Image: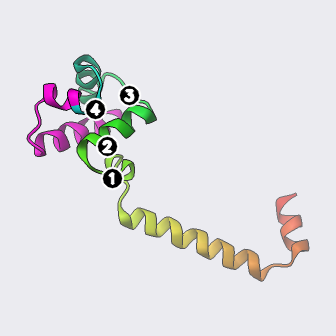
Amino acid sequence: MAKDISKRIKDLRQAMRLTQSRFVELVNLSEDSIGKIERGISLPTVDTLNKIAVGLKISLSELVGETRQDIKSSSQAIEEFLRYLKAKSSEDIRLTVC
């Protein structure tokens, strides 16, 4: 995962034609931190990923590679599960959980 997110961050930054120096100013992180993240040496925290996403003008979901299709699939799975639960009696649900 580290290499995937590292490459993604670097590719997106470069696509915006931002130097690493300019980018660190935008996201309020050190050049050392961004350099290590982009090289896959260090994993960013969620807070750092959020700062990077804001700097790249994308959502955190987009930054970590979650696509709209992933979100839609997850939503559909949840809806199917809820339909399944609604069709069951409370006794069936209690037996399933226990």
Task: Compute the Cα span from label 3 to label 4.
Answer: 16 Å
Majority SS type along the magenta span: helix
Q: Residue 68 magenta-drawn?
A: no
Tag 2 or tag 1, which sits nearer the N-term?
2
Q: Which residue is mark 2?
A: 53
Q: Which residue is mark 3?
A: 43
Near-viewer residue (32 or 97): 32
Q: Nearer the viewer, mark 1 or mark 3?
A: 1
Specify start and end residues of the magenta stretch as a single range.
1-25
Q: Is residue 47 above or below residue 34?
A: below
Tag 2 or tag 3, which sits nearer the N-term?
3
Judged left or right of residue 10, residue 50 is right
Dot 3 falls on a residue whose secondary structure is loop
How many numbered circles does the render carry?
Answer: 4
In percent of width and height, residue 65 lies at 33, 51
Task: Compute the Cα span from label 3 to label 2.
Answer: 15 Å
Dot 1 falls on a residue whose secondary structure is helix
Q: Residue at x 38, y 32 (%)?
A: 48
Tag 4 or tag 3, which sits nearer the N-term?
4
Q: Residue at x 29, y 24 (%)?
A: 29
